[in-house]
Image (cartoon, rainbow, N blue to C red):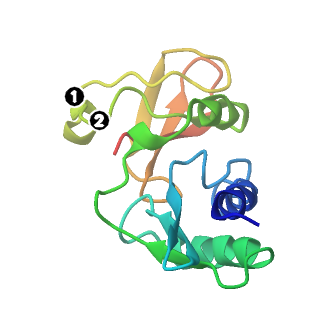
Amino acid sequence: MTDEQRLERVWTQVRSVHDPELPYLTVEEMGMVRGVRMQDGEVVVTLTPTYSGCPATDVISEDVSAAVQAIEPHARVEVVLSPAWTTDWILPSAYEKMRENGIAPPEGRSADRAFLTGQGKVIPCPRCASKDTEMVSAFGSTACKAHFKCRECLEPFEHFKCI
């Protein structure tokens, strides 16, 4: 088997690994997989966690490693923190899946400081699409999400912050 074929098989395996905190999304859709390459005859998968203190980093690394080693026993996973992960790396396919699961996806680009500075960021409700929403807390179930409520349908929801 050629190195190119080995890399493609590993990519296929990596694409099957789901994010433990958002199980309807893969780690690839979340933009955490930075690459799959050959290094000294070994397959190396490079991951960047959503933030450096993410408690799921070890689980994600172990899940990717287990999936990849099932077909490539000497492959390894390398976690890199630079460049830092950004919501700009989330694949477009993830946005609709987030909405379908009651999470408002990031609005704007990571350079948008409006959310972090509290400047009137409008986050549409993922359930009814109303823009009549309000932030309840800047912190949701994880550090990368904020807690909102919709004044229209009265449902609470989380918003994945632009990072």
**Would residue 55 be seen by someone viewing this image from the given angle?**
no
In the picture, residue 107 is in which quadrant?
Answer: top left
* Spot occupied by residue 97 in the image (x, y as percentages of width and height): 69, 35
Judged from this view, the residue extending furthest toward the front is: 2
In the picture, residue 103 is in which quadrant?
Answer: top right
Proximity of marks 1 and 2: CB atoms separated by less than 8 Å = yes
The one nearer the camera, 155 or 24, is: 24
Residue 119's disc is 1
Q: Say above or below: 156 vs 72.
A: above
Where's the N terminus, which quadrant? bottom right
Q: In the image, what residue occupies the spot 62% across and 27% down? A: 126
Q: Which residue is mark 2?
A: 115
Q: In the image, what residue occupies the spot 76% across and 56% down? A: 16
Secondary structure at numbered mark 2: helix
* Spot occupied by residue 53 in the image (x, y as percentages of width and height): 38, 72
Q: Say above or below: 104 vs 7.
A: above
Residue 26's disc is none
Instruction: Name the amino acid, label 2.
Output: Phe
**Would residue 63 be seen by someone viewing this image from the given angle?**
yes
* Spot occupied by residue 60 in the image (x, y as percentages of width and height): 60, 70
**Neighbourhood count class around disc 1 (C-alpha, 10 Å): few under 14, some 14–19, many 20 upward:** few
Instruction: Name the amino acid, label 1.
Output: Gln
Judged from this view, the residue extending furthest toward the right is: 70
Query: In the visual, does 122 lie left or right of 117?
Result: right
The one nearer the camera, 28 or 38, is: 38
Q: Say above or below: 102 vs 42.
A: above
**Neighbourhood count class around disc 2 (C-alpha, 10 Å): few under 14, some 14–19, many 20 upward:** some
Q: CA distance from mark 1 to mark 2?
A: 6 Å
Q: Say above or below: 144 vs 39.
A: above
Where's the C terminus, which quadrant? top left
Q: In the image, what residue occupies the spot 65% across and 77% down? A: 65
The one nearer the camera, 117 or 31, is: 31
